[in-house]
Amino acid sequence: MSKGDKVEVLDFWVSPFCGRVKISLEEKGVKYVASEEDVFGGKSDLLLKSNPIHQKVPVLLHNDKPIIESAIIVSYIDEVWPSNSLLPTSAYDRAQARFWTDYIDKKVFETGRSIWASNGEEREVGTRDFIEVLKHLEEALGEKNYFGGEAFGYLDIIAIPHSAWFLAYEKLGGFKIEDHAPKFSAWIKRCLKRESVAKVLADPEKVYHFILHFRKMSGLE
Amino acid sequence: MSKGDKVEVLDFWVSPFCGRVKISLEEKGVKYVASEEDVFGGKSDLLLKSNPIHQKVPVLLHNDKPIIESAIIVSYIDEVWPSNSLLPTSAYDRAQARFWTDYIDKKVFETGRSIWASNGEEREVGTRDFIEVLKHLEEALGEKNYFGGEAFGYLDIIAIPHSAWFLAYEKLGGFKIEDHAPKFSAWIKRCLKRESVAKVLADPEKVYHFILHFRKMSGLE
């Protein structure tokens, strides 16, 4: 890719899915513009035109061509800017990374939502489900420093942006992640020390207040 | 890969997701054993051990190592047996193929289910939703012979196995696919002439009777 590449991310500060795209670009040293979308007030024409089916962030615009769906965007970035490879090199390890990506996409945000967008028994069930998900991730991580082994890579980028929401889950669900998944908890701290992650991730306190605001607007508080 | 590879598919005859795996292996000329699972009566220990989280078919066992999730398995097969490439060569086209895979995975089976696993108004809504999905796929196909262009490839393999269920959707939903998506309908006929597809896909009449049986068991008829 030439140095004249135009790279824009249609972004929303609190979205863990947008976080994946920005961390990937940071890891690759690609210069980009993040354009904040007003996802509640009114989405831009550019977003609606770029992603007419889902009308969601993130969108990566690479020389004005749209790429959609965060995990697909991370793969695309890894293929277009191949130095500092993110996906594992063996086909089997890539399939494993994609399996856990799919698991995270199906489970983490949804079980998290059942904690923060509910009350009472529904929240209790949500909290139990979320802890179950954490335990599976703890097992997938095992004794490794990162999901792919010794180097920060694809699956770390997929998973870590969700952690900005975890303080809210802990406060609303009344539990501590490190009590249930100590290795996963240590992995979060390890990732947060990384420059790309520290630069991109939202402050968990701000996310918590965003969620409290959302709960008030929805009549949950 | 050596000729001594051991390749097994944990299979269920009517599953469009299993169909993807078998068509891919046929396209690559890889010899495999398809082991039919009793998904309602009792899953095998091998399935439960290979896919402990989802406990679902298909599983590809390659030299006894399990690979899970049908679209991920198709990518894996394409990477391990690279001759007769299935995924497009450009990163942008690959991202597009993966976007439509994700769309199909989220929409086709689920909107189909809301036709065949319901009655009355719910079925009417399901039928409208399914036709909407068809129109999006018709647009993605455009004037091309196959989703990726002139050659049968990855996205065709992802989409075509669902077509074995379409006769049941048409009969239960009271519509004809070719009235709403004539190019997509012609694409189905084109794919069905292909040896790999003809060999693998279940007979739509048999699928229809399977669904009727399921409806009776569930008290829907």
Image: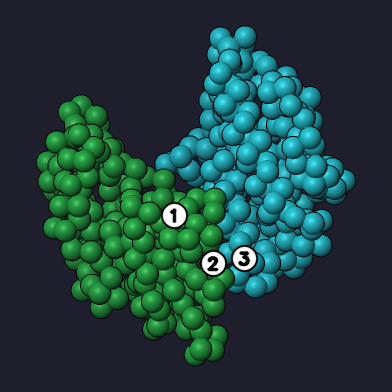
Chain colours: A green, B cyan
Mark 3: few, some, or many residues within 10 Å (few <14, many ≥20)?
Answer: some
The structure residue drawn at horizontal position 75% and vertical position 55%, both measured from the top left corner, is B142
Q: Using the image as rendered, state which of residue B21 and residue B209 is in the foreground.
A: B209
Is label 1 or label 3 in front? 1
Q: Nearer the viewer, residue A200 or A50?
A: A50
Q: Earlier in the sequence, mark 2 or mark 1?
A: 1
Mark 1 neighbour class, 10 Å CA radius: few under 14, some 14 to 19, many 20 or more: some
Using the image, name the chain to which the residue with label 3 belongs: B
Query: x, y percentage for residue B39?
Result: 57, 28
Task: Please give the residue where the numbered disc 1 appears in the rendered image.
Answer: A56
**Share a chain, discs 2 and 3?**
no
Vertically, is A121 above or below A38? above
Q: Nearer the viewer, residue A53 or B77?
A: A53
**Which numbered tag is attached to residue A75?**
none
Per the model, the C-alpha gap separating discs 1 and 3 is 20 Å
* Residue behind mark 3: B94
Q: Amino acid at mark 3?
A: Arg
Query: Residue B181 location, x and y as percent?
Result: 75, 41
Kind of residue sitting beneath label 1: Lys
* Residue indicated by mark 2: A66
Q: Is residue B36 above or below residue B135?
A: above
